[in-house]
Amino acid sequence: METLITSGVEVQVETMFQPDHSNFLTNEFLFSYRITLFNHNSFTVQLMSRRWKISDSNFDVRIVEGDGVVGRQPVLYPGDSFQYSSACNLASTIGKMEGIYVFENKATRTEFEVRIPVFKLVAPAVLN
């Protein structure tokens, strides 16, 4: 598990290789990830958008941007957490993801960035 706190928001990431949805013969590999966000601030925040940088061992880099996560823009009150799951496909058995979330401080209506820690996507078979 990777964890990082930026501007009072903690991001925890857990990854899982999905062998039933991957194919070594056609170089299609699916990885799921679960992210938990914790608001350690004394004020309410809302996740407005995200920007991902996805890299694989073939030197392919993709940028994915959009509003919210999994179709939502969750509001986190002080002490609240929010968890969601998503997935990423790669054309290689090894890759990584990193990025930022843009949050809004609901009290001041100002936006701030929260870093998503770099996390590896590795098919367990390549570690043997």
Image (cartoon, rainbow, N blue to C red):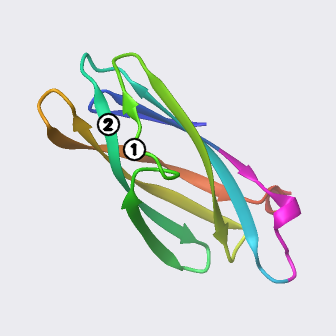
Mark 1: give few (<14), some (14-19) or many (20+) Cα within 10 Å.
some
| Rendered location of residue 23, percent (x, y) | 85, 74
Please say whether residue 9 is one of the residues in the magenta stretch: no
Badge 2 amino acid: Gln
Q: Residue furthest bottom?
A: 26
Q: Which quarter of the figure is the N terminus placed in?
A: top right
Question: Is 48 rendered above or below residue 107?
Answer: below
Contact, CB < 8 Å: mark 2 with mark 1?
Answer: yes
- Circle 1 residue: 73
The reply to whether residue 53 is visible in this rendering is yes
Q: With 108 as the anchor, is 6 left or right in this view?
A: right
Residue 98 position in % (x across, y down): 45, 55
Evaluate whether residue 101 shows in this view. no
38 left or right of 14 in image: left
Q: Quadrant of residue 127?
A: bottom right
Residue at 11% x, 31% y: name it.
108
Q: How many marks?
A: 2
Secondary structure beneath label 2? strand
What residue span does the magenta drawing correspond to?
15-25
Report helix, strand or loop for mark 1: loop
Vertical order, 10 against 26 (above or below): above
In the image, 38: left or right of 35?
left
Q: Amino acid at mark 1?
A: Gln
* Residue ID for mark 2: 46
